[in-house]
Image (tube, grey):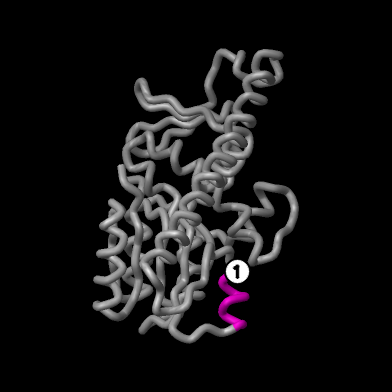
Amino acid sequence: MSTKILVVDSEKDIRDTLTNILESEKYDVLTVASGEEALEILGDEDIGVMIAEVRLPDMDGIALIKEASQVSTGMDSILLTGQASIESAIEALRLEAHDYLLKPISSQDLLSSLSGALSRREQTKRKRLLLEQLETSIQQLKEIEGMTELSKPDRQAIELPKDVQVDLARRELWRGSDHVHLTPTEGKMLRIFIENWGRVMSHSEIAFLVQGYEVNEWEAPEVLRPLISRLRKKLAVFPGGKGWIRSVRGTGYVFDAEYLI
């Protein structure tokens, strides 16, 4: 399956030009004219890289990257501008944008930058996968050594909608033959969400409860993003599970009962 690229630019001619360049290299391209449209797409689609104009009609590209980081995990970004400034370039790099390119941009420069962004994205995904596998392996070793409560005959289950059962002590969820085992961190995070069902929680509050130490408002979303992503993937096994944990733009997350019905 080809990687999806999102192009965000208010000028149709530029969107069409970038689309032609990218589609000639077999990329799957989506285009929008505003930041709000981009955020809607990011909430529904698995976007590999977002290529966005710095000056959009409803928000600048820097603000869009900040908002996008809370909606889409694992996505990289490239900013395009007709009037570069040191301040915006520094801010883009601080937000870990892959590149900051000056218009007009050649097809060669665009494709080269995009290739680098996709390569960095794959490296990040591999690192996260290795960390998850390592955490799982450590947990399996603990279970073999009898350090968990899995040997207990009775389950202390909480019933969720759609007949999904969860045992927070064992960090297990099941529905019929579908069964999911959570890592200690994932189990702790799910417990926190269930105990605060329907309440919007800030990034900082969740990070403190999960990690046990305080982080500032800028660091908290970065700490939570990979953890939330892994937990969402496991919950998606169950009907409606994909929407159990909702992002609240600019604030944090909510475990919303309305999405469980």
| Residue type indicated by callout 1 | Leu
Q: Position of residue 31 (x, y in %)?
A: 28, 66
Q: Residues within 10 Å of mark 1 (few under 14, many from 20)?
A: few
Residue at screen point 48% across, 58% down? 76
The secondary structure making up most of the magenta span is helix
Instruction: Provide the residue span drawn in magenta.
Output: 86-93
Q: Would you say 136 lies left or right of 69 here?
A: right
Q: Position of residue 178 (x, y in %)?
A: 38, 25
Where is 256 relative to 66, above or below? above
* Total labels drawn: 1
Q: Would you say 46 lies left or right of 200 here?
A: left
What residue is pinned by disc 1?
93
Label 1, secondary structure: give it. helix
Where is 195 relative to 221, above or below? above
Q: Would you say 161 lies left or right of 97 here?
A: left
Task: Please indicate, yes or no, whether residue 61 appears anywhere in the rendered image.
Answer: yes
Task: Please indicate, yes or no, whether residue 198 appears anywhere in the rendered image.
Answer: no
Q: Position of residue 50 (x, y in %)?
A: 41, 63
Residue at screen point 59% across, 34% down? 130
